[in-house]
């Protein structure tokens, strides 16, 4: 089953799509579940039950929406993707406090897009016991190939890799997904992330080789070309 991680709806301050529209879109693409990650900025505890209820109501027989929050550090440099919580924590908290509270609540946490604002420079090994994975490839931040910087953190920590769309607009769609087996439900998918049993896919094929190295030679070449074209357009 294909599962998409890291997506934002109009519940986020910068999201463009409603939850029902996201469920319909991804359902047509054969995605069985989208694990949402609304920004903590502008969110509060009072909204969280309504958000969870709307995710359930917007889900379709083809695509289930799993509620989640992307928590940010006080300086907004570090972002942590979380799922499995029944309460909203707070905006812009110290990363270690967020990670500890997520673990206590039985949720999972993923270090998002290490390249954004050079977040990798602030990575703290004290976070590792509380993290379930590192986002290896973020479509919005990394483009159309995986992040060598994220790979370094994965190899350093031994944590599993995830891929995510960071969906805000249609242009963030890309053939990236996580492969999972079993039940499509919030507890089952949270457990799969916690256990490291989801596998990252690119274009429907396993992204990682047997040694954990991403198979991205063609993607790297395409990304270099994309950047050159973007630079030309800017001139």
Image (cartoon, rainbow, N blue to C red):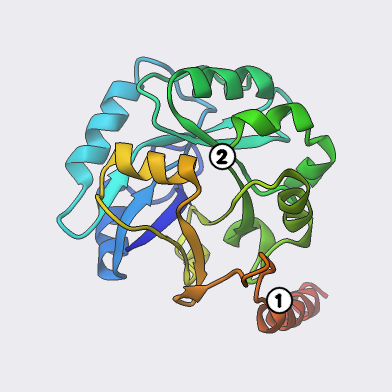
Nearest the viewer among 13 and 125 is 125
Who's the residue at 66% across and 56% down the image? 141
Neighbor class of circle 1 (other Cα within 10 Å; few <14, some 14-19, many 20+) is some
Q: Which residue is mark 1?
A: 223
What secondary structure is found at the residue carrying circle 2?
Answer: loop
Q: How far is mark 1 from mark 2, CA to CA?
A: 28 Å
Residue 169 visible in this rendered orientation of the protein: yes
Q: Which is more foreground, mark 1 or mark 2?
A: 2
In the image, residue 6 above or below residue 144: above
Rendered location of residue 143, percent (x, y): 65, 66
Nearest the viewer among 69 and 20 is 69
Disc with the residue nearer the chain's start (1 vs 2): 2
What is the number of the mark on residue 133? Answer: none
Rendered location of residue 221, percent (x, y): 74, 83
Residue 9 visible in this rendered orientation of the protein: no
Rendered location of residue 192, percent (x, y): 41, 46
Q: Residue furthest front?
A: 210
Q: Which residue is mark 2?
A: 132
Who's the residue at 62% across and 44% down the image? 112
Q: For residue 191, which quarter of the picture?
A: top left
């Amino acid at each position: 089953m294909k599962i998409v991680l890291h997506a934002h709806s109009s519940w986020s301050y910068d999201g463009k799509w409603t939850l029902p529209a996201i469920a319909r879109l991804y359902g047509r693409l054969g995605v069985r579940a989208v694990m949402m990650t609304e920004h903590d900025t502008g969110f509060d505890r009072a909204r969280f039950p309504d958000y969870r209820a709307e995710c359930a109501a917007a889900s379709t027989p083809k695509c289930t929406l799993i509620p989640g929050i992307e928590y940010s550090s006080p300086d907004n440099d570090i972002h942590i993707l979380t799922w499995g919580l029944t309460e909203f924590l707070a905006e812009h908290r110290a990363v270690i406090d967020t990670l500890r509270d997520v673990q206590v609540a039985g949720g999972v946490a993923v270090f998002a897009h290490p390249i954004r604002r050079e977040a990798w420079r602030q990575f703290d090994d004290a976070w590792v016991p509380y993290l379930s994975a590192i986002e290896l490839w973020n479509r919005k931040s990394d483009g159309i190939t995986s992040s060598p910087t994220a790979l370094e953190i994965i190899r350093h920590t031994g944590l599993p890799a995830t891929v995510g769309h960071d969906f805000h607009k249609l242009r963030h769609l890309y053939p990236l997904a996580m492969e999972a087996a079993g039940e499509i439900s919030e507890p089952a998918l949270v457990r799969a992330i916690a256990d490291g049993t989801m596998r990252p896919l690119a274009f429907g094929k396993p992204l990682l080789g047997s040694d954990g190295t991403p198979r991205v030679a063609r993607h790297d070449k395409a990304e270099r070309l994309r950047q050159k074209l973007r630079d030309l357009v800017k001139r």
